[in-house]
Amino acid sequence: MSGDDIIGLDARHIWHPFTQAETAPPVAAIVRGQGARLWDQTGKEYLDLVSSWWVTLHGHGHPAIARAVAEQAGRLEQVIFADFTHEPAARLAAEVTALLPDGLERVFYSDDGSTAIEVALKIAYQYWRNLGRERRGFVAFEGGYHGDTLGAMSAGRSSGFFTAWDDLLFPVSTVPFPATWDGDEAVADREEQSLAALARLLEGQPAAVIVEPLVQGAAGMRMCRPEFLRRLAAMVREAGSLLILDEVMTGFGRTGAIFACVKAAIRPDMVCLSKGLTGGFLPLSMTVATDDIWRAFLGQSIDRAFLHGHSFTANPLGCAAGLASLALLRSTDCQTRIAAIEAVNRTRLADLARRPPSRGAVIARPRICGTIAAFDVAGQGDAGYGAAVGAVLKKAFMARGLLLRPLGDVLYLLPPYCVSDGDLHRAWDAIGDVLQSLP
Ligand SMILES: *Cc1c(COP(=O)(O)O)cnc(C)c1O
């Protein structure tokens, strides 16, 4: 099919996510991906610096994952997951829990980040009910994003994306997220305020506290300190509530450690994983819970069980991709790349902040966590997710073959781990040029 035919069918029939079709630029039809690169119908090349919405870990079309999926498809493509199990699901659960802090032993599979969050919220709620204790509410962080289904939207309602459905969402209390950056001197004060607000809400005996650990993704790659998370985790434990970590984006090496909770040395009660779980090949997610939580669902009556499931729960192809991706992630090669990405980003971002463009943009709040680098583009009109500068930047980068999608006035890089130092340097050169060209 020709490129134009694809675009024509798309224009007639497809409704794209997070897109105002009336004003959006034309879509590109991607026909191939390899490593950190994508090619469209005209042969134009893109360097994927956002891991295709934060999912791709080892690059597009990685042969080891492609082979694992193909082999699994030839053996068993799918099976109902009630009354049945299979090797890829059992092995992947064992391998992931071995990498998580002690005590997180039970894996509930679902399909994407949003459903992993729904599952965690529903488990937390029923856990207290099964124990015969009254704990109902949830506490979340301002700006937190947990997905687009109704429960996940409720937990992330302060993110501002969901005004159309405000009346449908259940109430969730929020505390400020003490975002910080290089050279920030007031972070300790903000952390105290946040913890004080949390302490007040914990008195109300919430069922659980949910947080994106170390990095709030959709809020604009807002980063907090590990010591803040340690105090938070201790307070939640002390208050007897449950701590849910949304590691849908931060999981599988993004923060430099395998999981943000490992880097921060905290032990949550549940962890939600998706995005990088399959190396970005297939939709799959996990909600991992402690054995203590699991035991609260045991009993003779079906009512005590967790009555939740999806058609494709623990899909064998996704699990096979997950196992292949984990094997790659453990290789020294991959660990070297993860460290190298952080090193290049640190040098280049520090350079840019020290010697900003002579005109145009102001580089504000430079910050790095593992393979994620971000800064605010200030001095260009409004700030926040709706900032007009985001669209201007995106267009300029796309024209140069760089897939970068600013979150409003926040420019970030979140590349697949296979990206080379040379490609990263090229991206930073282009970022400098584009920022210089702003009015
Ligand atoms: C992307 C994301 C989600 C939602 O995942 P989907 O797979 O898009 O449903 C939830 N939480 C965080 C932190 C995310 O980045």
Image (cartoon, grey):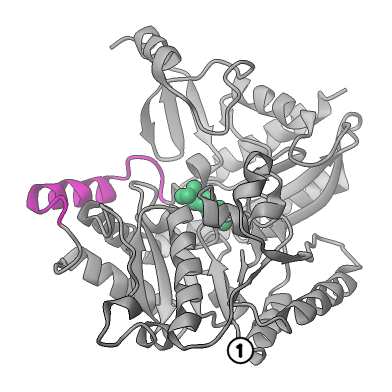
Residue at point 31%, 61% (across, down): 309
Is 62 magenta? The answer is yes
Between 361 and 241, the one lying in front of the other is 241
Q: Which residue is mark 1?
A: 240
Q: Quadrant of residue 402?
A: top right
Q: Which residues are magenta?
A: 58-79
Quadrant location of the N terminus?
Answer: top left
Vertical relation: 164 (above or below) 292: above
Q: What type is the residue that disc 1 sits on?
A: Gly
Quadrant location of the C terminus?
Answer: top right
Vertical relation: 67 (above or below) 234: above
Residue at point 53%, 47% (across, down): 148
Between 148 and 257, the one lying in front of the other is 148
Q: Is residue 328 visible?
A: yes
Is 142 magenta? The answer is no
On screen, residue 371 versus residue 327, left or right, reads right
Which x, y percent locates residue 222? Answer: 72, 56
Q: Is residue 417 visible?
A: no
